[in-house]
Image (tube, grey):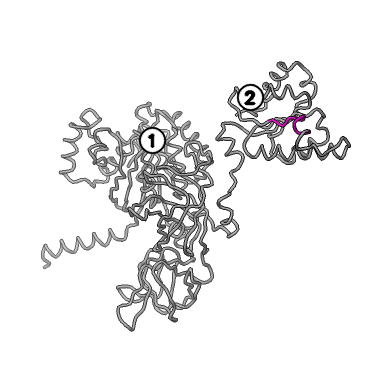
C-alpha cells in the first residue's frame, strides 16, 4: 500500500508536468490615466484564485485604509505597490504579475497611463503578445488612447483587446459601446492595427471578465479571460523555416569539442543543414545538435542548443547562424525608429553602444529625419530627441550587423542603446532597412520635406501667382504677415533688375524669364513658404507647366479682373478665396 507522502509527491509531480505543458501568454494593459488598468489585473488575479488568504486579508485592510472604493475591495492595490502609486491612485512603474488558469499561464504587465512614463510603457510592451487597451466608457477615445495604440502598433503587437471599461457607470449602454468601438476602429485603421476584439466590461464589478454578464444581454461575444485563454498568438515568423540563432557563447569544454551555443529565435535546424555565419558570410554544415539532455535530430524556435559544425571556421559571440538559402541583410548603416528613454537628450553624432541580440557595437546617429508627434502622428523637424520622444533616424555602426527588418522579426530587428559612460539604457529602437553608402555620404545634408518645414511655420506651402500690379502683392504680403504667415515675394520689377536683367523683350526671352521665376518659386515653396509672384504680364500657357512641378493644391492663379480692383478690395477677395479653397491651415 502506497504511503500518503508518496501519493502527495506523485500529485505534485503530475501538477508540475501539467503546468509545464501549458502555453504562456504575455500581455499588457494600457490606456489613459484612471481607465481601470490596475483594477482589471487585480480582478483577474482574484477571479483566477491566485491570491493567498493572507493577501486577501491584507487587501481588505488596505482597501479600508487607502482604497478608493469606499471600503469595498480595491483590486488596484494588488498591483500598485509603490507608496507614491497608492497615494496618487495611479501606476508609475511597470508592474509584472504571474497567474494561470486551467488552460494557460499568463504574465501581465500593468503599464502607466501618464505621458511622462512612456518609456515604462515601451518596456512593458516589448515582449508582449497581446495588448489590452482600456477606455473609460464615460470619456471615450482620448489622446492617450491614441498614443498607446500607436506605440502598440510600433512595437509590433498584432492582437488587441479593446476593453470598454466602467460600463456600470453609464448604465451598461449599448449605444455608448457601439460608438466607442466605431471611433476606435476608425483610428486603428490609420495605424495598421487589425486584429481587434472589443469587449464591454466593468473591472470593478466583474462584468464580462470570466463570465458573460446579465447586465449586457446585447453582447454575446467572448469574455476577457475566455479570449486570453484561447487566442492563438504563436509567432508565425518564429515557427517559419527561416532559421536564426544568435551565438551567445563559444562552448569549448575541452580540446575535442567546439560548439556554438544560443537560443533558436526563429525557424528550425537539423543535422546536415547548410548554415552561414554572419556577418562574415562563411558557410558549413551542422554536425550535431547538442543539448543538456543529449543530441537532437532537430531543434526548433525557443530551444537552447549548441551546434557543432563540420568545418573549423571563425565564429564568436554576436555572430548569427542562419540557413544559407534565406540569409538576413548585413549592413553598417540603417534607417530606424528610435524611442528615447533618458533624461538627457539624444544628440546627433555622439557615440553610443548598441546591443542587438548578443552583439554589442558602437554607433552614432548622424541625422534625425523627423520626430513623430505621437498624439497627432505629425512629422516634425528636430535636431535632438528628448525623454519619451520618438524619431525616425539614420544609424551608423562601426561594424557590420546582420539584421531582419523589425516588422519581420523582433529578435533580429530590435535593439537598445546604452550610454558608454553610465552604462544606462537610454534608447530602444527598431531597424527598418539598410542604407547605401551614397545615402550615408549625404546624411549631414539630408533635406527635410516642405510639409515638415511648413508645419514648423504653422502653415501650408503654396504659390500664389498674381497677374497684375505688384502693389497688391506687397499689400497682401503685409496682410499675411499680420496673420502669422511666412511669405516670400517675387516682385516683377525687382526680378527684371536682377535675376532677368540679361534678358530682352522677345517671346523667347519672356519665356526664359518666366521659367527662371518658376524655378525660384519652387525652391521657396520647398522651404515651406507661401510664395507670392507678382508679374505685370499674364502667365498664360505656362500655368500648366507650373502646376506640373508642384502638388495639387499648391498653386493658385489670381485672374486680372481681381487685381484690377482697388488694392484693399483685391486683397480681401484673395484672402477670402484662399480661405475657401483650404489653402490656409
Judge whether 473 appears above or below 265 on screen.
above
* 532 w.r.t. 100: above or below: above
Q: Is residue 396 above or below residue 468?
A: below
* Quadrant of res 480: top right
- Picture quadrant where residue 511 is located: top right
Residue position for label 2: 480
Q: Label 1 crowding class (10 Å Cα cut-off): few <14, some 14-19, many 20+?
A: many
Q: Residues within 10 Å of mark 2 (few under 14, many from 20)?
A: some
Residue 309 sits above or below residue 23 on the image: below
**Which segment is the magenta one?**
489-496
Residue at the disc numbered 1: 32
Using the image as rendered, state which of residue 471 and residue 215 is in the foreground.
471
C-alpha gap between disc 2 and disc 1: 40 Å
SS assignment at label 1: loop
> Which residue occupies the foreground of this view, 292 or 433?
433
x, y percent for residue 575: 67, 22
Amino acid at each position: 500500500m502506497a504511503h500518503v507522502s508518496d501519493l502527495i509527491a506523485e500529485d505534485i509531480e503530475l501538477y508540475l508536468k501539467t503546468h509545464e505543458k501549458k502555453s504562456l501568454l504575455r500581455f499588457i494593459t494600457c490606456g489613459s490615466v484612471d481607465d481601470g488598468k490596475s483594477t482589471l489585473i487585480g480582478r483577474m488575479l482574484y477571479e483566477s484564485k491566485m491570491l493567498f488568504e493572507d493577501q486577501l486579508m491584507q487587501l481588505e485592510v488596505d482597501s479600508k485604509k487607502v482604497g478608493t472604493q469606499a471600503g469595498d475591495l480595491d483590486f488596484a492595490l494588488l498591483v500598485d505597490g509603490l507608496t507614491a502609486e497608492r497615494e496618487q491612485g495611479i501606476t508609475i512603474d511597470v508592474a509584472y504579475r504571474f497567474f494561470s488558469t486551467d488552460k494557460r499561464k499568463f504574465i501581465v504587465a500593468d503599464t502607466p497611463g501618464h505621458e511622462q512614463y512612456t518609456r515604462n510603457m515601451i518596456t512593458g510592451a516589448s515582449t508582449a503578445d497581446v495588448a489590452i487597451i482600456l477606455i473609460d466608457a464615460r470619456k471615450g477615445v482620448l489622446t492617450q488612447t491614441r498614443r498607446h495604440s500607436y506605440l502598440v502598433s510600433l512595437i509590433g503587437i498584432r492582437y488587441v483587446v479593446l476593453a470598454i471599461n466602467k460600463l456600470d457607470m453609464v448604465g451598461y449602454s449599448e449605444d455608448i459601446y457601439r460608438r466607442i468601438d466605431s471611433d476606435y476602429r476608425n483610428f486603428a485603421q490609420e495605424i495598421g492595427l487589425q486584429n481587434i476584439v472589443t469587449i464591454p466590461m466593468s473591472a470593478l464589478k466583474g462584468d464580462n471578465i470570466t463570465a458573460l454578464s446579465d447586465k449586457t444581454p446585447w453582447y454575446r461575444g467572448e469574455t476577457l479571460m475566455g479570449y486570453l485563454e484561447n487566442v492563438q498568438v504563436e509567432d508565425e515568423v518564429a515557427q517559419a523555416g527561416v532559421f536564426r540563432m544568435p551565438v551567445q557563447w563559444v562552448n569549448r569544454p575541452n580540446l575535442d569539442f567546439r560548439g556554438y551555443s544560443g537560443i533558436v529565435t526563429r525557424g528550425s535546424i537539423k543535422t546536415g543543414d547548410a548554415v552561414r555565419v554572419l556577418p562574415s558570410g562563411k558557410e558549413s554544415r551542422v554536425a550535431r545538435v547538442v543539448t543538456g539532455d543529449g543530441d537532437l535530430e532537430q531543434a526548433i524556435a525557443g530551444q537552447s542548443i549548441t551546434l557543432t559544425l563540420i568545418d573549423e571556421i571563425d565564429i564568436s559571440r554576436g555572430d548569427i547562424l542562419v540557413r544559407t538559402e534565406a540569409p538576413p541583410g548585413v549592413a553598417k548603416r540603417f534607417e530606424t525608429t528610435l524611442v528615447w528613454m533618458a533624461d538627457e537628450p539624444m544628440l546627433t553624432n555622439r557615440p553610443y553602444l548598441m546591443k542587438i541580440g548578443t552583439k554589442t557595437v558602437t554607433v552614432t546617429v548622424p541625422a534625425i529625419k523627423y520626430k513623430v508627434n505621437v498624439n497627432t502622428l505629425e512629422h516634425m523637424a528636430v535636431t535632438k530627441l528628448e525623454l519619451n520622444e520618438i524619431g525616425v533616424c539614420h544609424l551608423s555602426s562601426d561594424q557590420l550587423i546582420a539584421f531582419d527588418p523589425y516588422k519581420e522579426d523582433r529578435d533580429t530587428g530590435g535593439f537598445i542603446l546604452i550610454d558608454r559612460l553610465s552604462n544606462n539604457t537610454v534608447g530602444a529602437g527598431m531597424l527598418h532597412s539598410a542604407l547605401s553608402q551614397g545615402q550615408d555620404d549625404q546624411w549631414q545634408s539630408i533635406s527635410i520635406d516642405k510639409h515638415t518645414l511648413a508645419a514648423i511655420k504653422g502653415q501650408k506651402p503654396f504659390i500664389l501667382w498674381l497677374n497684375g500690379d505688384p502693389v497688391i502683392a506687397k499689400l497682401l504680403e503685409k496682410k499675411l504677415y499680420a496673420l502669422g504667415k511666412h511669405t516670400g515675394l517675387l516682385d516683377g520689377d525687382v526680378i527684371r533688375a536682377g535675376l532677368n536683367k540679361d534678358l530682352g523683350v522677345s517671346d523667347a526671352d519672356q519665356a526664359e524669364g518666366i521659367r527662371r521665376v518658376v524655378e525660384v518659386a519652387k525652391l521657396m515653396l520647398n522651404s515651406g513658404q507661401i510664395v507670392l509672384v507678382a508679374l505685370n504680364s499674364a502667365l498664360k500657357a505656362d500655368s500648366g507647366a507650373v502646376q506640373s512641378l508642384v502638388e495639387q493644391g499648391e498653386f493658385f492663379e489670381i485672374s486680372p479682373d481681381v487685381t484690377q480692383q482697388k488694392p484693399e478690395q483685391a486683397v480681401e477677395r484673395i484672402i477670402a478665396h484662399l480661405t475657401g479653397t483650404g489653402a490656409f491651415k
